[in-house]
């Protein structure tokens, strides 16, 4: 099977199971909150066997980390607009859209829950954060290569991501375009 | 019983029950994470009857909100140093000490969990946030009365509290005095 054929057939049983299980987890977090459901309930909702979940993810904690990673990373690719201000504004707007969308609060709360939930959860949260920070650093490195003077990745976390995460968690929404651009302008 | 006598006897059975139940909740959150214990388990840990908890707090959710409120409010009174910079630095350092202390992560995670956990949890989170914002606004109002030019309370949330909360949740600690003062200086 060559690349083109693979692109035409992204599915297959494994991908379908992945998609329905991820959606079942997102739905259950939205309905019940983190920590209030079991692997068995995920399996029942997704219409797959418990053993399929344990074989693929090993534990509920690993499955939850996989869902959070997929949502926060794959769905918000890093922009490359040609300017630092443009990149940061686009990036901030993407994150805002993701975390204020239908499943947004569930995803943010999942990331938070994983970040402090014992060694396994902590590890999952660290991976999540490390991957996100790596992508962000690449964007900032491109700005430096163009001769711009980018902030540190941790400053972006502190003054763009953290305010948006906390406002979503505390229900202080919507995040308006003016508010989001204001966070970027203040940082730059 | 006059005021002085009351002050000498802050305890009594009700206060003792309150203290042991609060500590049991804090311990269980630290050990198991939010959402992974019942009223019965809190009661057993505290050495009181289930009915005592239901009579006083009504539900696990209300009890959790009460614990979060008590920890985040009563233990961090607002400073009054005579200058805005002094007040904000002292306040930020107090919050940092509370959220990086032995039970700090548990308290922050509890506040986050309550903030998005359905109508009852959301209401508890709203109360928590509203009370915190009211105290903060009083401090900022005093600065304005002195002729200083204070930021909005929401700017303090966005650029001092949110970064510290997110760093604790993501395990990016310690929060050093330089880091905390830097957040204040950047905002002012």
Image (cartoon, coloured by chain):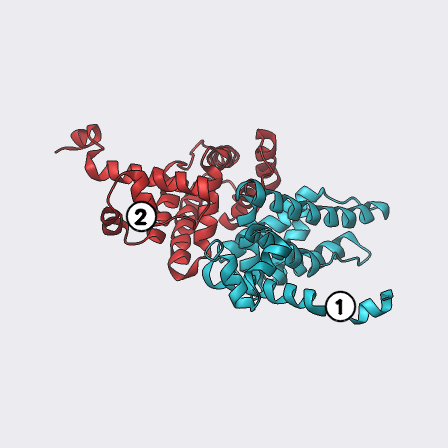
Chain colours: A red, B cyan
Residue A59 placed where, x, y %?
Answer: 31, 54
Residue B24's mark? Answer: none
Residue in the image at 41% along x and 51% along y: A130
Q: How many marks?
A: 2
**Which residue reaches farthest left?**
A1
- In the picture, the quarter occupied by the N terminus of chain A is top left
Marks 2 and 1 sit apart, C-alpha to C-alpha, by 49 Å
Describe residue A186's horizontal placement relative to residue A126 as left or right: right
- In the picture, the quarter occupied by the C terminus of chain A is top right
Can the viewer see residue B122?
A: yes
**Which residue reaches farthest bottom?**
B8
Position of residue A180 relative to residue B133, above or below, is above
Q: Secondary structure at mark 1?
A: loop
Residue B97 placed where, x, y %?
Answer: 62, 63
Q: Secondary structure at mark 2?
A: helix
The verdict on a common chain for dots 2 and 1 is no
Position of residue B83 relative to residue A97, above or below, is below
Tell me which corner region of the image, top left, top right, bottom left or bottom right, holds residue B174: bottom right
Can the viewer see residue A188?
A: no
Residue in the image at 56% along x and 50% along y: B61
Observer-nearest of B46 and A132: B46
Observer-nearest of B164 and A32: A32
Name the residue tied to disc 2: A40
Q: Chain of mark 1?
A: B
Mark 2 crowdedness (10 Å alpha carbons): few <14, some 14-19, many ≥20: some
Name the residue tied to disc 1: B10
Tell me which corner region of the image, top left, top right, bottom left or bottom right, holds residue B91: bottom right
Tell me which corner region of the image, top left, top right, bottom left or bottom right, holds residue B99: bottom right
Position of residue B92 relative to residue A70, above or below, is below
Residue A120 placed where, x, y %?
Answer: 37, 59
Q: Chain of mark 2?
A: A
């Amino acid at each position: 099977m060559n690349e083109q054929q693979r692109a035409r057939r992204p599915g297959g049983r494994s991908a379908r199971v992945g998609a329905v299980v991820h959606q079942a987890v997102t739905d259950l977090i939205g309905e019940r909150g983190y920590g209030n459901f079991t692997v068995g309930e995920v399996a029942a909702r997704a219409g797959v066997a418990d053993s399929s979940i344990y074989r693929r993810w090993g534990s509920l904690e690993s499955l939850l980390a996989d869902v959070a990673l997929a949502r926060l990373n794959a769905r918000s690719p890093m922009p490359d607009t040609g300017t630092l201000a443009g990149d940061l504004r686009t990036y901030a707007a993407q994150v805002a859209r993701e975390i204020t969308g239908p499943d947004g609060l569930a995803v943010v709360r999942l990331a938070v829950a994983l970040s402090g939930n014992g060694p396994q959860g902590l590890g999952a949260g660290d991976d999540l954060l490390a991957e996100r920070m790596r992508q962000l650093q690449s964007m900032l490195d491109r700005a430096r290569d163009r001769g711009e003077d980018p902030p540190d990745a941790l400053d972006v976390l502190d003054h763009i991501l953290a305010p948006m995460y906390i406002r979503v968690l505390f229900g202080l929404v919507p995040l308006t375009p003016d508010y989001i651009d204001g966070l970027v302008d203040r940082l730059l």
